[in-house]
Amino acid sequence: MSSINYNERIPNNVDLSENRRLQRALESWLPNYLSWWDELGPEGTQGYDVYLRTAVDVSANGWANFDYVKMPEYRWGIFLNEPIPDRKIGFGDHKGEPVWQEVPGEYRSTLRRLIVTQGDTEPASVEQQRILGQTAPSLYDLRNLFQINVEEGRHLWAMVYLLHAHFGRDGREEAEMMLERHSGDPDKPRILGAFNEPTPEWLSMFMFAFFTDRDGKYQLASLAEGGFDPLARTCQFMLTEEAHHMFVGESGVMRIVKRTSEVMEELGTDDPERIRQAGAIDLPTMQRWINFHYSVSVDLFGQELSTNAANYYTQGLKGRFHEGKIEDDHRLIDYCYPVLMLRGNKIVEEQHPALTSVNEKLRQDYIDDCQRGMTRWNKVIEKHGHDFKFQLPHRGFHRAIGNFAEVKVSPDGKVISDAEWSTNKSDWLPTDSDREFVKALMKPCYEPGKIASWIAPPAKGIHGNPFEYEYVKFH
Ligand code: BYC
């Protein structure tokens, strides 16, 4: 394993220069990537100097360098975690066998599909966020947005490298397609639903980073368990970067909650209209955003009972979250798992084979993690003496994939009629007027040290710098 080589056009720690054909193929993909960035990456930002971190090492200590960079000149590269010597496959039919360094022929199309699905989400999120740079609540937030954007771009590189290095001509074609599908494009949409939803303002941005990036964490962690070692090592390194994205989401929402709580205290009211008039976002509105982003993210785990997922597991391609820490046979032969099923108009818990319930198990781990973050938000509200509590809606609420896609489920988990849904929808999901209000609130606040009215400043700045630091310089 070599250290990261920055002298090459594509920084990498995979000895790219020793494989001239691959290097040339990736170098010919690079200009396409850059035109995509120019066209669909953060709008109008080409000349900005942004205080960004760049990966310079894959070890846990001091892996990143912080400096001003113009985004089109960011050193997108290919970084895999160090291999674990003698690593063995940890689950499924191949449990105990050495991990694969090459793609096993029989799993080629399945692996390609998993890599393509993963890769597709990365540029999708950049596209979704492209206009947010016009309305950030502070330079600190603007910089965090751009940090996320360049890293999602790098995650696309990570998947494109695997496609080029291991899937021949099909892989190269898939890499091209990554830049041809676009978020929300009616003809060539992104693969997964949530990645075709717009992220038009910063409340959505923070919710997306909390809920949807967290799906990324769980999916990457499951792929990191898999038997195809280059994919596992790539995902491990992506997870290192991903942690910051979720921090941005959780702390972003937390800072909005803090500001709203302060305004409620100042005004002595929780009347949403008065909170809004004071330039803050009322808590019921935030709850509607939670309901939306949570439900579309919950869909990203696929069907509750999935033979696809069972096959990925049995074939050793995609494991469970922290597979190694789970105490069972890691083959799931005689195990069951509780799954909520729709029986008539009732939602009932049933035991199903754990193997076909692997998606559901991952979804549950994800839900528990979301709940932990939400509890931290609720503590802020409580600390300010208000008795409002955010709640995650029922997992059947507002679903487009799986058992509950065909019915309407209320946030508290009752199957309801279409009429009941229509009557209550505006209390449960963002309405057009909510969206207009939130959008109208978004005004850029780009003086160092200043912050918009609807969000509290962060507790600290980036990499030891104060909040007042000039994180982005415009030219
Ligand atoms: N939208 O058997 P099922 C991230 C399809 S986010 C549309 O349950 P499976 C990031 C499914 O493809 C992480 N279609 O499927 C976050 C299948 O199609 P076919 C992204 C959907 O395969 C923020 C059919 O329905 N990574 O990194 O078990 C910013 C049957 O479903 C959806 C991954 O997703 C959907 N939501 O599960 C940036 C990991 N759900 O076979 C980045 C790789 C299902 O009928 N992907 N379908 O044609 C996977 O592991 C799986 O593909 C899924 C789906 C978990 C997504």
Image: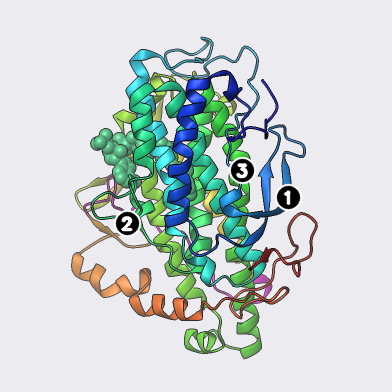
- Give the residue type at disc 2: Gly
Q: Is residue 319 visible?
A: no
| Left or right of 303 in this view: 50 | right
Residue lying at 27% horizontally and 45% vertically, measured from the top left:
403
Q: Which mark is residue 401?
A: none
Q: Residues within 10 Å of mark 1 (few under 14, many from 20)?
A: some
Q: Earlier in the sequence, mark 2 or mark 1?
A: 1
- Give the residue type at disc 3: Arg
Q: Which mark is residue 184?
A: 2
Q: Is residue 97 visible?
A: yes
What percent of the width, then of the height, locates residue 311?
A: 34, 24
Q: Does label 1 point to a residue whose CB lies under 8 Å from ligand 1?
A: no
The residue under label 3 is 75
Q: Which residues are magenta?
A: 381-406
Q: Nearer the viewer, residue 401 or 404?
A: 401
Q: Earlier in the sequence, mark 1 or mark 3?
A: 1
Check the image and tell me how it is coloured. Answer: rainbow
